Image: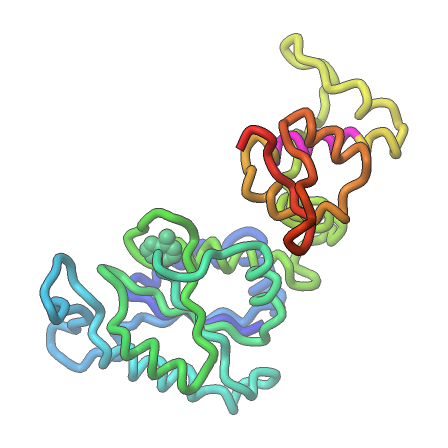
Amino acid sequence: MRLDVVSIFPDYLAPLRLSLIGRAVEDGLIQLNVHDLRRWTTDRHRTVDDSPYGGGAGMLMRPEPWGAALDDVLGEADQSPGTAGPPRVVVPTPSGTPFTQRLAHELAAEPWLVFACGRYEGLDQRVIDAAGERARVTEVSLGDYVLGGGEVAVLAIVEAVARLLPGVIGNAESLVHESHTDGLLEGPAYTKPPSWRGREVPPVLLSGNHAQIARWRRDQSLRRTADRRPDLVAALPPGTLDGRDLEVLAERGWTVGDAAEGEARLVRLDW
Ligand code: ADE
């Protein structure tokens, strides 16, 4: 996979050279190019921002450097083997579509991603509109809070995407049961020693009975999801749940609602 990141703080992206992703870059699984947006400024002060038309607080990023940067980066399409078509352009912004494990999988299937990191109050809309005529542009939010810029979001998105690429994680099996893969949060996990400061590892995990362990883990997963993320429980298709699943969810006040209007859904009794 080829990754290009354009930012006014290229040093912010240094962690992409460390750990799991760093190794994938060294091994050639990821071709990483980090670009300083100011390279594409033309004035003495290397200006990238200005005040918004119509008034309001804060500064916006001017379109000229971004236009020139994206012209150059997107223009490299023909020279990159495997990335002959235009890349998918990702613009991190708090007003974007939420970043989820599903979107991570979608991005992991792309041969080439270009990240445009905004600072201040974001990019002039014309940059996004113009890029949208040449490439698929997705504005992505990490969550319902405001960061100082897109760089931290890119670190998170790239880490979530890169670990899904074949060969990046040693044990691909570990991707199967992690949180969000099946719409549930992962439950608690334990390692050695079996007893620590008077706290015991749940005996079932030491039993060697794999069926019982799998059931216990699923119960924990359902309970934790019900306690922390009722929105995820409400989105579970009841057809994917067995009798024991429904029993565990019933302990937390969930039941299968009336299917009169389309698909049956899980509902909370006290809502
Ligand atoms: N830039 C600023 N805030 C952001 C957020 N929540 N997600 C993605 N990019 C951002």
Q: Position of residue 246 (x, y in %)?
A: 74, 34
Tell me: residue 59, above or below residue 236. Answer: below
The colour scheme used here is rainbow
From the viewer's side, name the closer residue of 240 and 212.
240
From the viewer's side, name the closer residue of 21 and 190.
190
Task: Look at the image and say whether residue 224 sits in the magenta stretch.
Answer: yes
Q: Can residue 12 be seen in this view?
A: no
Q: Position of residue 153 (x, y in %)?
A: 41, 56
Tell me: residue 194, above or below residue 61. Answer: above
From the viewer's side, name the closer residue of 190 and 100.
100
Question: Which SS type dominates the magenta stretch?
Answer: helix
Left or right of residue 194: residue 100: left
Q: Can residue 28 be seen in this view?
A: yes
Residue in the picture at 56% in, 64% down: 25
Q: Position of residue 225 (x, y in %)?
A: 61, 36
Task: Look at the image and say whether residue 38 sits in the magenta stretch.
Answer: no
Span shown in magenta: 216-225
